[in-house]
Amino acid sequence: MSTAVTLINVFTANPGKQQDLVRALAEGTRNFFSRQPGSLASSVIVGGDGCKVVNISQWRSAEDIAAFRSAPRFAEYVKTIMALGTGESLMGHTSYSHTAGVEN
């Protein structure tokens, strides 16, 4: 099992707002939380249905996620995201992965 913590956020964009949500998540990642202590990696995945967007990030620890979420900029960031859709989060550890023929 990995010691890194994976944070998965699944969003449903408001009608016609999927690309705006994608841009806001990418900008937030690039300019804010990828620069926070403990941030390891992040991806924004665009659903083919025109409304779903998934943001997957890996962090060194749950404490690093809590610290980033308590940063003053986080509340404003969340307001921007929630104006574009709704979402839910899941935090956990990777118990199995497969990359180019290698199992972990």
Image: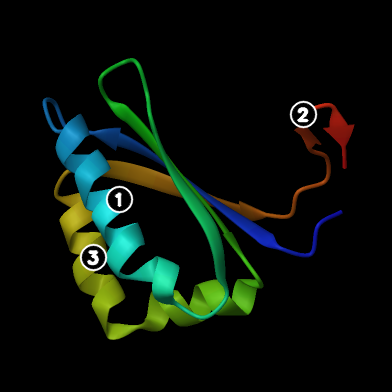
In front of the other: 47 or 88: 47
Question: For mark 1, what is the residue?
Answer: 26
The amino acid marked with disc number 1 is: Ala
| Residue 75: % across, % down | 25, 72
**Pointer 1 or 3: first along the chain:** 1
Query: Exactly how many numbered labels are in the figure?
Result: 3
- Determine which of the numbered discs, if any, sits on residue 1 in the image: none
Mark 1–mark 3 distance (CA, rounded to whole Å)? 12 Å
The image quarter containing residue 55 is top left
Task: Please tell me which of labels 3 and 2 falls first in the chain.
Answer: 3
Please give the name of the residue rendered at 27% of the width and 84% of the height, measured from the top-left corner.
Answer: 72
**Vertical placement of residue 50 versus 42, above or below:** above
Amino acid at dot 3: Tyr
Circle 2 sits on which residue?
100
Q: Farthest front residue?
A: 100
Q: Quadrant of residue 104?
A: top right
